[in-house]
Image: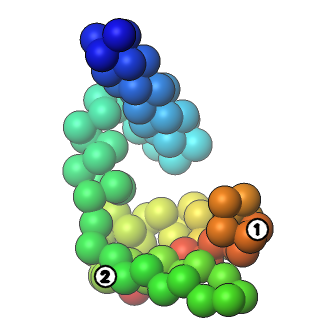
């Protein structure tokens, strides 16, 4: 059972990285998971959870400014398991 769960989680993570690469575009459609992780996921951020919203404030980094240019900071996402609070991404 443990092997099956590990395999399923690995496949889910791989699919989510692939989806991220497709959404980013500009050659990242075929990037490996470790490249996407290094360039976009592995970042220092401060998370603030208030009654109104969840704010994730990223420190300045080269690839993070690219993500901001692509409009990820303008997307509205509600987090269902936190009373549908909106998630706000802040870069720089």
Q: In which quadrant of the rendered view does residue 2 lie?
A: top left
As displayed, is residue 7 above or below residue 12? above
Visible in this render: residue 83?
Answer: yes
Foreground residue among 92 and 81:
81
As displayed, is residue 66 above or below residue 26? below
In the image, taking residue 9 as reference, residue 15 lies left or right, namely right
Q: Residue at x 27, y 73 (%)?
A: 44
Q: Residue at x 34, y 77 (%)?
A: 45
Q: In which quadrant of the rendered view does residue 59 lie?
A: bottom left
Can you identify the residue that label 2 sits on?
60
As drawn, the label of residue 66 is: none
Assess whether mark 2 and mark 1 are in contact (beta carbons under 8 angstroms).
no
Foreground residue among 89 and 70:
89
As displayed, is residue 89 above or below residue 49? above
As displayed, is residue 32 above or below residue 42? above
Residue 47, position as x, y percentages in the image: 43, 80
In the image, taking residue 12 as reference, residue 84 lies left or right, namely right
Which residue lies most toward the front here?
Answer: 1
Q: Residue at x 38, y 19 (%)?
A: 5
Q: Considering the image in quadrants, where does the C terminus appear? A: bottom left
Residue 68, position as x, y percentages in the image: 52, 71
In the image, taking residue 14 as reference, residue 15 lies left or right, namely right
Q: Secondary structure at mark 2?
A: loop
As drawn, the label of residue 84 is: 1
Q: In which quadrant of the rendered view does residue 22 lie?
A: top right
Rounded to the nearest angstrom, the CA distance separating label 1 from label 2 is: 28 Å
């Amino acid at each position: 059972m443990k092997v099956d769960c590990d395999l399923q989680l690995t496949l889910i993570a791989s699919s989510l990285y692939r989806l991220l690469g497709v959404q980013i575009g500009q050659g990242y459609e075929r990037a490996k998971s470790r490249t996407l992780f290094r360039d976009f996921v592995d970042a220092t951020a401060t998370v603030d959870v208030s009654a109104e919203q969840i704010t994730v404030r990223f420190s300045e980094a080269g690839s993070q400014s690219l993500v901001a240019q692509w409009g990820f900071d303008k997307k509205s996402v509600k987090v269902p398991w936190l009373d549908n609070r909106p998630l706000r991404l802040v870069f720089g």
